[in-house]
């Protein structure tokens, strides 16, 4: 079970964050990035979402403010050298960041891993992993619900809904529970 209080302490501790996910991102990856950026916005934190792969065309709607940047070593080197923390989402092996792996291996800040996959690499002491959850998006939903400070809004709800819906195979896979349906019902009430 994830200790969301400890996760919030880390989010509040730092002033700036790199946010990323795995190569060839799916809606859980992109949706989780947008949802966590919404949390950081509400906490008045600075962040950069940087991905190894470009956002697929059919997922561009999840990033209505065009926040996601395509990794360029020369352009982003100073960010990896100066930012205090990084949040890696929907992956638990740094090799899944592909071209960004070297930059993360050299990163001096704290790395926060939020994921739902098995057999983590343990590249950080800040692992927030729940293999019982349907998706990383569901974990972020639970994070928001654990706090009085963060509120769901349309962008966050759309991002999390997309993450859960796709990682459950349109609610067909084994981790589709009544709890998942209750959570998505809350999300649908927020997004028109």
Image: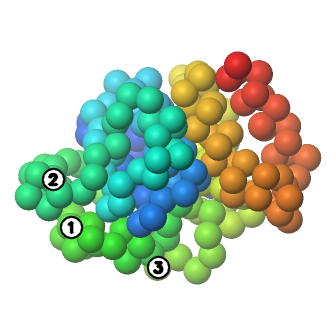
The residue lying at 77 percent from left, 37 percent from top is 184
**Label 1 crowd (10 A; few <14 / some 14-19 / many >=20):** some
Task: Provide the secondary structure element on which disc 3 rests.
Answer: loop
Q: What's the residue at 83%, 52% (across, down)?
A: 171
**Residue 144 appears anywhere in the view:** no
Q: Position of residue 125 (x, y in %)?
A: 42, 67
For residue 3, above or below residue 131: above
Q: Is 190 on the left-hand or right-hand side of 121?
A: right
Q: Which residue is mark 3?
A: 121
Which residue position is annotated with label 2?
Answer: 76
Comparing 93 with 1, the one in front is 93
Q: Residue at x 76, y 57 (%)?
A: 168
Nearest to the observer: residue 36 or residue 126: 36
Residue 92 vertical placement versus 150 (above, below): below
Residue labelled with disc 1: 103
Q: Is residue 54 visible?
A: yes
Between discs 2 and 1, the one toward the N terminus: 2
């Amino acid at each position: 079970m994830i200790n969301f209080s400890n996760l919030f302490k880390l989010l509040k501790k730092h002033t700036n964050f790199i946010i990323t996910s795995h190569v060839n991102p799916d809606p859980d990856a992109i949706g989780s990035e947008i949802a966590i950026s919404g949390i950081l916005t509400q906490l008045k934190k600075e962040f950069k979402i940087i991905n190894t792969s470009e956002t697929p065309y059919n997922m561009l709607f999840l990033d209505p403010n065009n926040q996601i940047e395509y990794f360029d070593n020369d352009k982003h080197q100073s960010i990896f050298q100066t930012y205090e923390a990084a949040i890696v989402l929907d992956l638990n092996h740094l090799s899944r960041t592909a071209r960004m792996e070297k930059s993360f291996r050299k990163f001096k800040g704290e790395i926060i891993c939020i994921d739902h996959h098995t057999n983590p690499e343990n590249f950080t002491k800040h692992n927030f992993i729940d293999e019982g959850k349907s998706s990383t998006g569901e974990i972020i939903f639970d994070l928001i619900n654990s706090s009085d400070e963060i509120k769901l809004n349309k962008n966050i709800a759309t991002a999390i809904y997309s993450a859960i819906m796709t990682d459950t195979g349109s609610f067909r896979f084994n981790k589709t529970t009544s709890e998942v349906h209750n959570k998505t019902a809350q999300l649908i009430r927020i997004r028109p």
